[in-house]
Amino acid sequence: MSAHTPFLVFSGTKTRYLAEKICNSLRCPLGKMNIQYFADGEFSVSYEESIRGRDVFLVQSTFPNSDNLMELLLMIDAAKRASAHSIIAVIPYFGWARQDRKDKPRVSIGAKLIADLLSVAGINRLITMDLHADQIQGFFNVPVDHLYASSVFLEYIKTQLPLSNLIMATPDVGGTKRASSYSKYLEIPMVICHKTRQQANEVADMRIIGDVADKDVLLVDDIVDTAGTITKAADLMMENGARSVRAMVSHAVMSDPATTRVDRSALKEMIFTDSIPYTKKSEKVTVLSVAEIFAEAIRRVCNDESISSLYTIK
């Protein structure tokens, strides 16, 4: 990269596929760094070019396993010690976000702990997308640019889906605000699935609030983990007379046996972003890239321009 360019983009190991797309959009090379692994699983990070006085963007999602988070923390620390002008963590998928409050006695608030770790390591700004809970932004004492996948999803809805008979749906009450935003913008109806859980990742009971008969249903959510909730919701929609059911999800955690559940379910299509690498194979899965969103956010941060104006709905 030429000496006059004020910023550099680096990537962690598991998010390199996305960082390369971001750099293609920015028309800049991906920064050179080296990660050395030791026999016991420990690793160290070093930058292979000068970053003194530069704005450094570090691209790394913190999906399982925890090595991805640890790698990012070491990248931040190394950048701080190498005299970077500013350190911006670009975290397309912010892990531990489901632990945003004490929902029962004697539990940790993981999202706050991760925010503290990133802050102590030395970030000056965070760029992330579709947080599980908006209030996580308040866990940081640095600026947080909260991006939304809605721009890529809306383009896909308008060009690829049957709008005339479409109805928005949420697989649980917690996603009502998100589904409502799409419903209002597209001027289409919305239904809600109400579920109860007996334990994590296991749905005990589910029922539909609203009418889906003869409708093309589009379920929207921020995270799909084991796909138990979303596939059960899809099956329930079909049992209640829906014409077709698709799901649109920002972050494809997709822990086993999620892909098998999707393939066996009534879902016609599952639409993800590439915030997390999806390595399994399924004919039902469509992956949309958010690289352009993050590239534009980086451009605007560097140029001190508004980021909120990027989004039609939030």
Image (tube, helix red, strand yellow):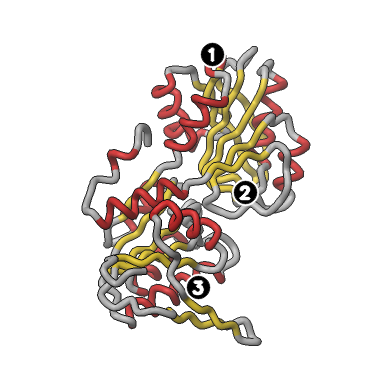
Element type at mark 2: loop
* Residue 67 picture quarter: bottom right
For the point 67% across and 17% down, the residue is 243
Q: Nearer the viewer, residue 276 or 65?
A: 276
Q: Nearer the viewer, mark 1 or mark 2?
A: 1
Between 305 and 244, the residue placed more toward the observer is 305
Q: Residue furthest left?
A: 304
Picture coordinates of residue 140, whole percent (x, y): 32, 60
| Residue 254 location (% of width, % of height) | 65, 50
- Residue found at x 29% / y 67%: 55
* SS type, badge 1: helix
Q: CA distance from mark 2 to mark 3?
A: 23 Å
Badge 2 is on which residue? 225
Q: Give me the C-alpha separation between circle 1 and circle 3.
A: 47 Å
Q: Is 140 situated left or right of 272 in this image?
A: left
Can you say which quadrant of the picture contains the C terminus? top left
The local secondary structure at tag 3 comes to helix
Instruction: Give yes or no for contact between labels 1 and 2 (Cβ–Cβ under 8 Å).
Output: no
Q: Residue at x 42, y 18 (%)?
A: 187
Residue, far bottom: 39
**Amino acid type indicated by mark 1:** Ser
Residue at image location 44% in from the left, 28% down from the top: 182
Q: Is residue 156 visible?
A: yes
Mark 3 sits on what residue? Answer: 71
Q: Earlier in the sequence, mark 2 or mark 3?
A: 3
Quadrant into which the N terminus falls: bottom left
